[in-house]
Amino acid sequence: MLLPVAEVLTSQQVAESLRVLEQADWVDGHVTAGHQSARAKHNRQLAEDSAASRRLGEMILGALQGHPLFVSAALPLRVFPPLFNRYEGGEAFGTHVDNAVRQVPGTPHRLRTDLSATIFLSAPDSYDGGELVVEDTYGVHSVKLPPGHLILYPATSLHHVKPVTRGVRLAAFFWVQSMVRDDGQRTLLFDLDTAIQGLSHEHADHPSAVQLVGIYHNLLRRWAEL
């Protein structure tokens, strides 16, 4: 499932992020690249242990917890602390697949990357290129979203970032370990949850709504890994 999630960050949060990022020190993006992706990666990142990265990352994690569409789609168990990247002057990231397991910096914890996510921070008309291109069984999808919007997609997907030929592309990115590992099962639960919410909104007292909620939770109980 490839899903755009609108307005994860408010306009004020986006403005604050851009202000902090414009004053930040950037390092070579290879610092978080695996062996295969390092050859394709040409961008810059905030150091993971920098004060700016931690501050903005905590803001994003707080926003994700309160966003019902993200929670419904991702069913998050663990979220990797958000990272931040910068593309300009022809920088790009060639086709790759994200690492299956990530070590959370400064902790003994590891996270299985079921889902990848990017939050766009730069206005689309402020730069040329920079589209995130995701390949799945339904084809090739080119994504370039407004500031504060997020794209969520299976981490198993081949994807790349096109060269930025004008301006600067700033974004946050991170990975999610879901309670439901299988993308097909997770998509089915999301579709069912969406249908339940629609039915409950129009017919709050309909007995089928209660029955469907029970089916949803019984499927989640069967498939969830905690």
Image: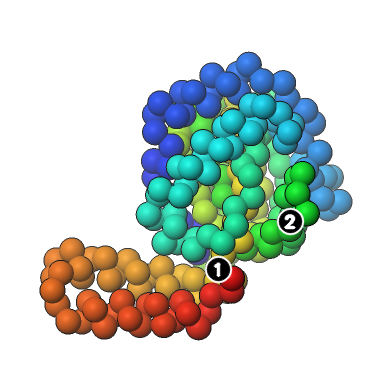
- From the viewer's side, name the closer residue of 197 and 119: 197
Where does the image place residue 204, in percent across and percent down from the top left?
A: 15, 69
Residue with the mark numbered 1: 179
Secondary element at tag 1: loop
Residue with the mark numbered 2: 109
Left or right: 9 as drawn, with respect to 90: left
- The amino acid type, in three-letter code, at marker 2 is His
For residue 127, the mark is none
Left or right: 131 as drawn, with respect to 97: left
* Residue found at x 59% / y 71%: 226
* Residue found at x 46% / y 49%: 65
Which comes before the other along the chain, label 2 or label 1? 2
Asked if one can make out residue 168 in the rendered structure from this viewpoint, the answer is: yes
Left or right: 93 as drawn, with respect to 195: right
Secondary element at tag 2: loop
Where does the image place residue 148, in percent across and percent down from the top left?
A: 45, 36
